[in-house]
Image: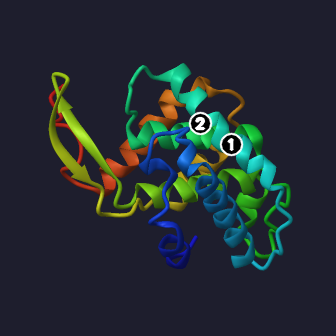
Amino acid sequence: MSDASDRKTSTKSILEHEAGDQKFFCQDVVVLATFSECCYKRIGIEPALIWKKFEYIVNDIPSILNRNTGATNPSVFKRAAALTIAFIATSPLDQIFQSNKFPKKLAEIGNHQNAIVIFEYCRQCLHNACYLKEEKGKPVEMVQLKRKIKLSAHFYYDMIFAISNIKTDASFHFLALNYELMAYKANKGASYPEKI
């Protein structure tokens, strides 16, 4: 999407605090809806958003995390996966991105607008995100993901296609691993040591 939207919401990442924390509920809803609105406006579409749908998304994140991880403080990658699944399950964006203003190949993917917006939001949130490396269950090092995830056009298309076809949270772990691998690829030295 653009650096302007990155700057606009970079200090208000839903991935930074505990999912379901009610003191951030309104902020999370506003941030997601505003980010979505900006994505539409950037390609010249005046959005018609239903804000209640963004409330459903924010409310669904904790239950997705609870069903899929026993961690008391899930990683930013697992939070990104839960947010992506909640967003796609609700699919709050009804207006497609028109192929005359957007790459035709992407515009032909069903539900592309929801997949693109949530993937871009998570990708942006992972830029400068921090996570705690652990070894044998003990904290070892705080790592900051200083570099933004960059992808080939081919991989981007495949990722949007895969996200747009999510039906349940059965893909939670694969999605979390994808976010983690993309972040590690962009940030050399951020991953755990490759020993196997």
**Viewer-side residue, 34 vs 125:** 34
For the residue pair 144 and 51, the one nearer the viewer reads as 51
Residue type at tag 1 = Ile
Please say whether residue 22 is visible from this viewpoint: yes
Residue picked out by circle 1: 57
On the image, the x and y values in percent for residue 24 come to: 55, 50
Residue 107 found in image quarter: bottom right
How many marks overall? 2
Q: Residue at x 48, y 74 (%)?
A: 7
Along the line of sight, the residue nearer the viewer: 42 or 106: 42
Graded by Cα atoms within 10 Å as few (under 14), some (14 to 19) or many (20 or more), the crowding at tag 1 reads many
**Residue 77, quarter of picture:** top left
Residue at the image point whose x is 42% and y is 50% from the top = 16
Instruction: Identify whether 134 is placed above or below 90.
Output: above
Mark 2 highlights which residue?
61
Q: Position of residue 30 (x, y in %)?
A: 66, 60
Residue for point 82% across, 61% down: 49
Label 1: element kind: helix
Query: Please, what is the three-letter code of the amino acid marked with disc 2?
Result: Ile
Q: Residue at x 49, y 31 (%)?
A: 174
Q: Is residue 44 left or right of residue 172?
A: right
Left or right: 104 as drawn, with respect to 129: right
Q: Using the numbered discs, state the Cα–Cα distance from disc 2 to disc 1 in whole angstroms.
A: 7 Å
Q: Do the numbered discs 2 and 1 sit on residues whose CB atoms are within 8 Å?
A: yes
- Residue at the extreme front: 23
